[in-house]
Image (tube, grey):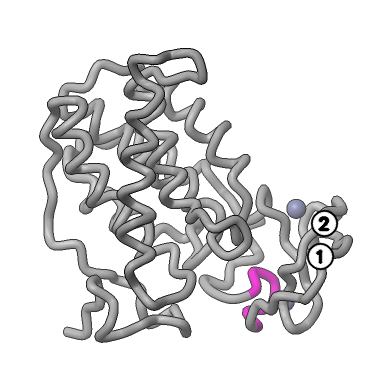
Amino acid sequence: MEKYNFKSGCLICGKPIIIQKKESEHTCSICHKTFISSTICSEGHYVCDECHTNTHEFVELLLNSKETDPTVLFSQIENLESVHMHGPEHHSIVPCVLLTVYKNSGGHINLLSAIETALQRGKQVPGGICGFWGTCGAAVGAGIYASIVTNSSPLNSEAWYKPQKLVARVINRISQENALRCCKRTSRHAILESIEWTKEYMGIELKKNEFLCTLYYNNKECLHENCPFYNNK
Ligand SMILES: [Zn+2]
Ligand SMILES: [Zn+2]
């Protein structure tokens, strides 16, 4: 996995990702398993969601962190070698960052077990879901966080609606932008909305800092001045 590490575009060759009209069978260039997808690179490479997501490095950072500010923690994680510009790893990173700061701010959870649950759920949220399912995976990631801290389940009438309030707010926020995919932008919206939600529903105040993007130069679809997190200093 380590030898394939283009930060944006195709993991194998760095060329742009293209979306084919119809989904079809592709063999992952890394694990050689076969999947149905419409997303390949212009050279024909396909990398499956699991091979795109290297959780080891960011989980280790989180489990050793005392940080109580999710904006600081997310910025640290997005700069790790194993985290790409875009990709389904963000569907796990968002809940895991939030769970860590929740625990570090006095929230009553077993962090290791909560992170294991978040990774298990996050990896089921496919890459490209924002464009194919009408629901951004970073918003679903916020929902995974909220479901874990409220102990929500399909049969828990006390908690059931609360995570959905958060996801609705995140989706509402990101859908106001006339934009396209950017995992850095939507993860930031998801985290900022989660800070408000955590105060309101869990009574815990998470810290928050200036949340400017550190990686826009890697993103050829960046909105630049039209992105609220754009930092051209
Ligand atoms: Zn390629
Ligand atoms: Zn694979």
Q: Is the N terminus in the top left, top right, bottom left or bottom right quadrant?
A: bottom right
Q: Is the C terminus in the top left, top right, bottom left or bottom right quadrant?
A: bottom left
Secondary structure under the numbered disc 1 in the rendered image: strand
Question: Is residue 217 left or right of 28 when viewed as pictured?
Answer: left
- Residue drawn at the location 59% of the way across and 67% of the way down: 5
How far, Cα to Cα, is label 2 from label 1?
6 Å
Seen in the picture, residue 29 relative to 229 is either above or below; the reply is above
Magenta residue span: 10-15
- Amino acid type, residue under disc 2 in the picture: Ile
- Residue drawn at the location 44% of the way across and 69% of the way down: 182
Q: Are marks 2 and 1 in contact (CB under 8 Å)?
A: yes
Q: Position of residue 58 (x, y in %)?
A: 43, 45
- Amino acid type, residue under disc 1 in the picture: Glu
- Residue placed under numbered mark 2 in the picture: 36
Seen in the picture, residue 80 relative to 105 is either above or below; the reply is below
Q: Position of residue 104 (x, y in %)?
A: 20, 29
Q: Position of residue 85 (x, y in %)?
A: 47, 68
Residue 14 counted in the magenta span: yes
Disc number for residue 23:
1
Secondary structure under the numbered disc 2 in the rendered image: strand
The residue closer to the viewer here, 125 or 156, is 156
